[in-house]
Amino acid sequence: MSHSGRPDLRSGLQGASSRGLFVILEQLYQELPDTTCARRGACCTLLPLVFTVELAAWLHRLPNAPYKERAAQARRLVEHFLVNAAQRRPCPWARPDSCAIYPDRFMGCRTYGLWTPQAYEKRAAQAAQGQQAVAQAWQGLGVELPPEVLAPAPPYCRLVKPVSGPAPDDAAIEALEERAIELSRDLPDGLDRLHDFGGDISFAVASLALGQPQALSLKVAVTKAMLSGDEAEAHELLAKAGTAAKRWAQSY
């Protein structure tokens, strides 16, 4: 794949669409009930991990958005990736009391609050283990991540309720996730690289816009600048990355 990945990416996305994979993904979403919550987005403090087929579907939809919207989304996602080791950032699509992409939100958002508390705690514990591994990797680079970045996931929300009918049980949700994993495995060869991003859509966009090695090295540089208090250096690096993100969105 080239620096931007456009030729392989576009043909791969078109192939996935032709196979009906994105339609099947939408059908999976429809098997989950619509929900309501009195807190209205108060738990949307983290960018959710996505299945690879969800990342592909988002990339497939992106060219349909007006340029300014594409550019804004790309810039926010790239900045999120570069900054989130130094500061705990909310999901780039989180708005006061709402979600900017609510109709197209990801499965992790749709299932939040539907799990039993026991299943959620198990997943939160697994996420905490992953955070510790990330913290150790940063320590190897001489960086001590701040406690706010390593804070646990939001406490389980008991206020999410299906609009109608019962909530699916844990086994049903897990079965839907397995089907999303299978869809991800069925993506065309041109989309192989999307698996490398571990479900982190901000990492994917930063890599597509900047090139993966540059995205990773820039993340280290921004993190070190922010944690050392060098705001001018961090601002300059983020400004350049934001320009690259908007350029990628324009040519995408």
Image (tube, grey):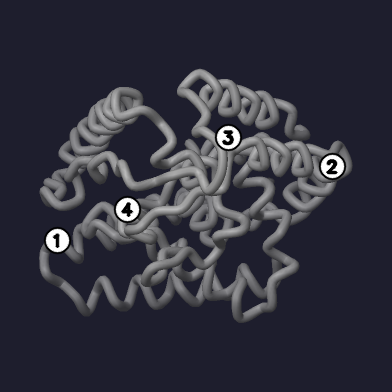
**Residue bearing the label numbered 3:** 195
**Residue bearing the label numbered 2:** 15
**Mark 4 or 2: the one toward you:** 4
Left or right: 85, with 228 as reference point: right
Disc 3 to disc 2: CB gap under 8 Å: no
**Mark 4 or 1: the one toward you:** 4
106 or 193: which is nearer to us?
Answer: 106
Q: Which amino acid does label 4 sit on?
A: Cys
**Residue bearing the label numbered 1:** 227
Residue 104 in the image: above or below residue 248: above
**Residue bearing the label numbered 4:** 43
Residue 219 in the image: above or below residue 22: below
Query: Badge 4 local density, few (<14 within 10 Å), some, or many (20+)?
Result: some
Mark 4 or 2 closer to N-term? 2
Q: What residue type is labelled 3?
A: His
How far apart are the alpha carbons under marks 3 and 4?
Answer: 27 Å
- Residue 209 visible (yes or no): yes
Mark 1 or 3 closer to N-term? 3
The residue at the far front in this view is: 165
**Mark 2 or 1: the one toward you:** 2
Left or right: 70, with 152 as reference point: right
Residue 230 in the image: above or below residue 192: below
